[in-house]
Image (cartoon, rainbow, N blue to C red):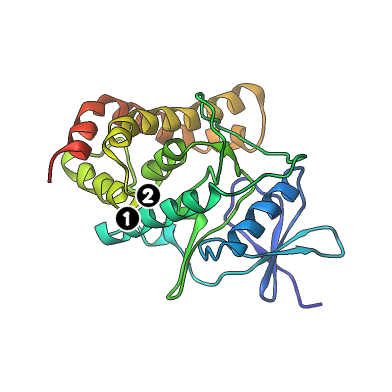
Amino acid sequence: MEAEEVLTGGNVAAQVVRVGSTVRKPALPQTAAVEAVLTHLAESDFDGAPRTLGRDDQGRHVIEFVPGALAHTMLPFALDDLRRVGRLIRELHDVMETFEPPADAVWQSLVPDPAGGSLICHNDLAPWNLICNDDRWVFIDWDNAAPSSRLWDLGYAATAFLPFTPQGTVEADAPRLGALVDGYGLDQEQRHALPAQIAARTWGSYELLVRGHETGEQPWARMYLEGHGDYWGPTAAYVEQHHDAWVAALTAKR
């Protein structure tokens, strides 16, 4: 067997290693359901997710290693890149409409959509989970896949990919949000609804960190102390404060 190379940089997963052209991750209660999701995506010819390759002799989940750069190192994205991200997420959501979850599926949903939802979504669509190379853009780390909704999933992606920050301005951020949304192809009703979903989903990330700080649950307690809450809380307030401006920008006739 080839040597194992520890892959660093994640906040949540236990030890993840590369072995040749594969990645090995410890199996979790939701791993069987994640394998079903990745199998469906592969069978649907969606190339924006890694291929699942079974388990190794240690019981670890074996996944295709995708070479390339993390999108997180490439920010800020140009408008065309944001449109591409929007198209990729739309393709993912459309393909998942035909997915039939296993009857015994176990899911991990850290920040569930309060309104519910039956579409199995990635739930962590962010530049730290997107690998970019000349052939493919691939979303990795599917452990949080779970029932949700299109706008809840897209709302998180909007905060992460623009990215929204407390120091942002409507003048700078509205065109970037528009590019992501245009790439996805939201209709007018969805464009009206999205800004509130972005704010609520961003508050959800902040509340997850606060709960971890209060209860000691890891890794959220550690991440709160490292300052992640200082980003998510003020960012949620900024997005919420300018709700009407986002709606106006997204729904303006062009």
Viewer-nearest of discs 2 and 1 = 1
Residue lying furthest top in this view?
214
Q: Earlier in the sequence, mark 2 or mark 1?
A: 1
Q: Which percent across, then down, holds residue 247?
A: 23, 32
Q: Are marks 2 and 1 in contact (CB under 8 Å)?
A: yes
Label 2 crowd (10 A; few <14 / some 14-19 / many >=20): many
From the viewer's side, name the closer residue of 171 and 119. 119
Tag 1: amino acid: Leu
Residue plotted at (38% across, 34% down): 198
Q: Which percent across, then down, holds residue 202?
A: 42, 32
Label 1, on which residue? 82
Left or right of residue 252: residue 34: right
Q: Is residue 141 above or below residue 106?
A: below
Residue lying furthest right in this view?
57
Identify the element where label 1 is drawn.
helix
Q: Is residue 181 above or below residue 67?
A: above
Tag 2: amino acid: Phe
Label 1 crowd (10 A; few <14 / some 14-19 / many >=20): many
Identify the element where label 2 is drawn.
helix
Q: Which percent across, then down, holds residue 221?
A: 61, 32
Left or right of residue 68: residue 52: right
Q: Is residue 64 visible?
A: yes
Label 2, on which residue? 161
What is the quadrant of residue 3 in the picture?
A: bottom right
Q: Is residue 169 visible?
A: no
